[in-house]
Image (cartoon, helix red, strand yellow):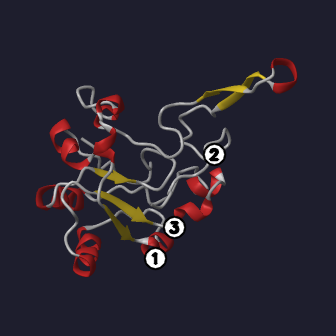
Amino acid sequence: MVDLSHKLDTGIPHWAGFRPATRTVLYDYPTDGFLAEEYCHVGQWGTHVDPPGHFFPQGRRLDDIEPKEMILPLAVIDVHEQAAADPDYSVTVDDIRRWEKKHGPIPPGGFVALRTDWSQRWPDQEKMLNRDANGVMHYPAGRWTPCAICTKSEESPHRATKPPTPAPARPSAPRTIPTSPTSWEKTATR
């Protein structure tokens, strides 16, 4: 097992649309004899899962997903060289085909992750967001080109994909999240 998460803390990189997390000591050893802390953050903080209900009101919410559904065969498509050359890189059908030529078909019901090496910028918020002079963020958001996501959904339906970055969408790239609950159910944890 490989831990791909980062330490959860109040100062970790996060999408600018969310307030920073807070941590408050409610009880402490000197006065109370024990330590209890209160954490306040949005659900999409740190390493997390976006269930279909994050994008579609009728989609399944995280508490509707059984833990056993979260243990999946993993396929990691390495696009770190492309991401280094183009911070707005999106995975393509050709990337998937190269991976499958080397490793075989992506397992049905699998989790498809991307290796972009963007995590090497962690925990620096500004390096992670990579803003240009106009404030536009540039990073490989794990957004699949529409052809890539549709190709994989039809050929080998997978349950989950994961972008390696702190924001739900990159303003410099077109939104390529599937537009209906049916297509999302094919491409996200279901």
Judge from the rendering whether residue 14 lies leftward or rightward of residue 167; answer left or right.
Answer: right
Q: Earlier in the sequence, mark 1 or mark 2?
A: 2
Q: Earlier in the sequence, mark 3 or mark 1?
A: 1
Horizontally, residue 69 falls left or right of residue 76, namely: left
| Outermost residue toward the right in this view | 30
Mark sitting on residue 81: 1
* Disc number lying in front (3 or 1): 3
Q: Secondary structure at mark 1?
A: helix
* Residue 169 coordinates in the image, percent (x, y): 42, 46
Numbered label attached to residue 12: 2
How many angstroms separate mark 3 from mark 2 (CA)? 17 Å
Q: Is residue 131 visible?
A: no
Residue drawn at the location 23% of the way across and 45% of the way down: 178
Q: Is disc 2 surrounded by few (<14), some (14 to 19) or many (20+) residues within 10 Å?
A: some
Is 74 placed left or right of 148 in the picture? right
Observer-side mark, 1 or 2, equals 2
Near-viewer residue (176 or 133): 176
Mark 1 surroundings: few (<14), some (14-19) or many (≥20) residues within 10 A: few
Toward which corner of the image does residue 145 lie, by quadrant? bottom left
